[in-house]
Image: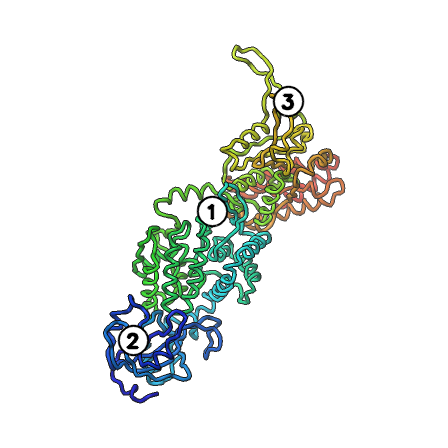
Amino acid sequence: MNSNLDENTSKTCWFVGATYGSDDQTPRFLREGIWENGYTDRYLELVKSARPGERIAIKASYTRKHGLPFDNRGRSVSIMGIKAIGVITENLGDGRTLKVRWETVEPQREWYFYTVMKMIWRVSPDAWEKEALIDFTFSGKAQDIDRFRNAPYWRDRFGDNAPSLNAFKWTNFYEAVADKLLTFRHRREELVAAIHNISTRVEGLAHLQDIFKDGSKGPLKDICPFTVMGIFNRKLKDENRKEIARELAQFLEISEEVPTGFDGVPLLNNQNSWLFAYDEHRKADDIDTLWEVFARALAFADSDDDVTKAAFMLAYDNAIVRKNVKWNLTMGLFWARPWFFLTLDGQSRLYIDKVLDMRIDTDTAKHCCSAANYLTLLDALRNRFQEDTYPVHSFPELSLAAWNFVDDKHIAIDDNEDDTAKAAAESERERIYTVDNIVEEGCFLEAAAIEKMLIQLRRKKNIILQGPPGTGKTWLAKRLAYALMGQKAGERIRAVQFHPNLSYEDFVRGWRPVSDKEGKGTLALVDGLFLEMIDIARKPENTKNEYVVVIEEINRGNPAQIFGEMLTLLEADKRTPNEALELSYRRADSERIYIPANLYVIGTMNIVDRSLALVDLALRRRFAFINLQPLLGERWRRWVNQEFKLDENILLDIERRIIQLNTKITADTSLGAQFQIGHSYVTPPLGANINDAKAWFRQIVENEIIPLVEEYWFDAPGKIREAENILLKGF
């Protein structure tokens, strides 16, 4: 090290960048004996304040995970490479140029942890970290790496007793996901296809259904990286989140371990878990804008180049004002780089306000942080993190503290809409009905299985739910209709029960006695329920909506007779005007009828009824048949326990008894699996008040299950008594 630098008594030192865009100016600066500010509108006054005799160093800042002289636990480490040192000999006073007596540093020396995200950094030895940096740079002293590792701001990640070994281990995985996602920026079709493929195997992805500009609904065709990370950061069970994360990691070829826990990780609301609007409401570049800010964020987090900072700020401000973005953008940035970015979800904002007593400035049209205010807040918090006595010392620790924070006087805000549009947004959310809603309301099928049913319904237009008694066929039929429509619109559903006396004239159209204006009886041609629904669905104002006819016990009637020519028109490929047919009863010779594509049929069928064989051939080609089975198990027990507070041990006993009886029924050659007792018998309806679980079960057995068993074994009293013992003995 040059002795004239050691002898310099000036306390202020300067750490400056030398890269403008992609061009490294260091060789030129050394050759010409100068340093130049690359901006004409930035840092001018700061540069003017530099005085001859003050020391200066050219730095290059970057991050690295490998080849470090300490255990970094797989995490990125901020590094500042010292490329040259010198003394300012003259300040030209233009805010641009300093004359410098330079000395190269070969090989480049690397400084860890204490770096800065700005091109020009003025440093005075007023804190131990700064004094250590100055001694390292200009006097050649070694950095006490262990002291920095165990300092407040870095100890969560790199300290000897880092709590991050457990609490924040998830950060490695999240950063790896973000890195891999960026490679799909221009391969989004492949990414979307993979996610939809995952949704067929894993529960919890039913929300990936879009509403297109023509009013139709279908699987999402495009996606942003934040929403991708959001698929395992929604309000789901941890096991579901792990499974989704595991599947995504496998597709992305990520080697990092899937987190064992998610404590402190902010979550999206299940009803608002995209960072963009439905296709019918979003702008053409909304998703591209989110990819841009994602890419700029990763570049900014991995470099302190002013160019990357400016690019990030521009992208951030462009994205933050888009529909459905708002505060969720900061959540996504935090997921991608949790040690660098701050989440400003509702709970974190509450904690920052009430515990840290720090103001969050909101100055955008969406009443949230601009890029400038967001980065100012980040810098302010980073400075406070270095204080031993500060409540938190990193962004993950802040998020965890906020997650655990309880304040009875204040409620965290979990919004993502414009304040002026909040009421409308809430109304929209209440209307939305998805597969998640079906599960929440007490369906014990996996969400992926329900999604497959919906796929069949959309493809075939007609499905039949078949299964033993009590498997929830009618209950599920109506909720599948809601999920198909995307909302709980009961006015667009008509239900009818088939029976042996139901006819074509009742269901489609026929002559019926009516009274005229004078009260005299006459015959009139009257449309039945099915034709009424056809007419409603075909109206121009209704063509963008789905309509559903639910037919209970479809095999109890004679479908071929009841549908008539409509049975042919039910086929999905015949739902056009070109396939229209004459009805048996026409209002005019020219009248032709077709079933519109937006009218769906969901039938239910109790397969205990042996009449199935008579109608199977007539229905099979037009309907997709979906089998339902009794669903007793952990999912059933958990739901009943949560909704009705019934003792888990009693539920286990009930489950064991029903399964034992079903095993006996299945083994009986005169019956079989189709005669099993379904879970609906022992699933209380919502709103039921059950004070005595055992008394409730005994009542169900005596009034509902035993009468059914008596029909099964009407000629075998011994089997009936055995069934009764299975269900009630010792209970």
On residue 585, the disc is 3
Compared to residue 77, the image places residue 348 above or below, namely above
Residue 33 x, y percent position in the rendering:
31, 81
On residue 123, the disc is 2
What element does badge 3 sit on?
loop
Q: Residues within 10 Å of mark 1 (few under 14, many from 20)?
A: some
Residue 458 x, y percent position in the rendering:
59, 42
What element does badge 1 sit on?
loop
Disc 3 to disc 2, C-alpha distance = 93 Å
Q: Earlier in the sequence, mark 1 or mark 2?
A: 2
- Check the picture and name the quadrant holding the N terminus: bottom left
Residue 188 x, y percent position in the rendering:
52, 56
Residue 340 is left or right of residue 253, and the answer is: left
Residue farthest bottom in this picture:
3
Q: Amino acid at mark 2?
A: Val
Q: Residues within 10 Å of mark 2 (few under 14, many from 20)?
A: some
Residue 411 x, y percent position in the rendering:
36, 51
Note whether residue 471 is visible: yes
- Residue denoted by label 1: 278
Q: Amino acid at mark 3?
A: Tyr
